[in-house]
Image (spheres, rainbow, N blue to C red):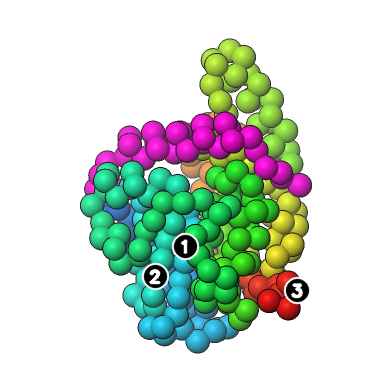
């Protein structure tokens, strides 16, 4: 099970994340708006099967970066939080007032108990310092009948073994940190285990489905990777894909009758 990483490692990840976004053109959001819109529609289509969604529905996205689902939802009362919120507000041209973006960590959410109808955690858990604490906080601020939309990348065991070897080479010979933006790299069973502590999965998308890359399963993912650079093509040829998307919808596990 993935545990809390040292604060220094998390701070290095945040620094790397900021540097990454600083290198990206400021018109990035505008160019990717179609993807965000598609993702927002995808979320709504899943939610309406399990819950009534209207103008009074309260949404929270944790770790929304410069833009994500929360910025393109056309319904409900929207809130968002990210450790680099102040940087995103100053660097990118987007109306963050609509999503009420504030600075903060998922491990310590500044919201009241049982406050939100829907919480979005999309490819964020591997960026956090303490994944279990984040999910505990999500459980706390989610309403009793609320839903968690969860999405995160995971890795195959063989890929992680290769990554561990490569990270040592990179550190010893180049003095660089491997995968600096991500303090955690999860196996699928670890994601399922950590989610089950606070939530019940009520819907699970097919493994590998990724709206951004327009793939629906691992077979399509392999075909996509085989068209990319050699460093991704060779592992894919042997069935090692690197990041694989996992998506699910969860209901809250009630604790102590609350």
Q: Earlier in the sequence, mark 2 or mark 1?
A: 1
Where disc 1 sits, the SS reads strand
Question: Are the residues at dot 2 and dot 1 in contact (C-beta closer than 8 Å)?
Answer: yes
Q: Which mark is on residue 221?
A: none
* Whether residue 135 is situated above or below residue 254 in the rendered picture: above
Provide residue 136's location: percent of width, then percent of height. 65, 60
The residue that mark 3 highlights is: 256
Q: Could one spot residue 227 in this view of the protein?
A: yes
Q: Gap in Å between the C-alphas at discs 3 and 2?
A: 28 Å
Is residue 11 part of the magenta span, yes or no? Answer: yes
Residue found farthest to the top: 173
The residue that mark 1 highlights is: 61
Q: Earlier in the sequence, mark 3 or mark 1?
A: 1
Q: Gap in Å between the C-alphas at discs 2 and 1?
A: 8 Å
Classify residue 82 as left or right of residue 99: right
Q: Nearer the viewer, mark 3 or mark 1?
A: 3
Question: Are the residues at dot 3 and dot 1 in contact (C-beta closer than 8 Å)?
Answer: no
Residue placed most toward the observer, 234 or 58: 58
Q: Which mark is on residue 78?
A: 2
Where disc 2 sits, the SS reads strand
Residue placed most toward the observer, 133 or 191: 133
Instruction: Please state, as top left, top right, bottom left or bottom right, where the C terminus lies in the image.
Output: bottom right
Provide residue 250's location: percent of width, then percent of height. 64, 71
Where disc 3 sits, the SS reads loop
Kindly report the secondary structure that dominates the magenta region of the rendered protein. Answer: helix
Tell me which segment is drawn in magenta: 1-28
Is residue 8 part of the magenta span, yes or no? Answer: yes
């Amino acid at each position: 099970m993935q545990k809390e990483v040292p604060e220094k490692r998390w701070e290095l990840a945040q620094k790397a994340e900021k540097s990454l976004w600083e290198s990206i053109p400021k018109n990035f959001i505008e160019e990717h708006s179609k993807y965000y819109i598609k993702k927002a529609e995808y979320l709504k289509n899943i939610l309406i099967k399990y819950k009534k969604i209207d103008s009074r529905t309260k949404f929270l996205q944790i770790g929304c970066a410069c833009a994500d689902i929360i910025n393109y939802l056309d319904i409900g009362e929207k809130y968002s939080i990210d450790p680099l919120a102040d940087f995103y507000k100053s660097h990118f041209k987007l109306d963050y007032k609509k999503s009420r973006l504030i600075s903060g960590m998922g491990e310590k959410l500044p919201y009241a108990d049982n406050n939100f109808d829907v919480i979005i955690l999309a490819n964020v858990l591997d960026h956090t310092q303490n994944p279990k604490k984040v999910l505990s906080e999500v459980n706390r601020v989610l309403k009793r009948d609320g839903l968690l939309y969860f999405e995160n990348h995971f890795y195959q065991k063989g890929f992680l073994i290769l990554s561990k070897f490569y990270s040592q080479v990179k550190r010893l010979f180049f003095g660089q940190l491997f995968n600096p933006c991500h303090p955690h790299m999860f196996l699928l069973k670890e994601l399922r285990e950590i989610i089950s502590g606070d939530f019940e999965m009520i819907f699970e998308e097919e493994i590998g489905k990724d709206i951004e890359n327009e793939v629906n399963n691992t077979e399509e993912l392999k075909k996509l990777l085989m068209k990319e650079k050699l460093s991704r093509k060779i592992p894919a040829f042997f069935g090692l894909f690197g990041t694989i998307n996992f998506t699910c919808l969860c209901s809250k596990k009630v604790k102590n009758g609350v």
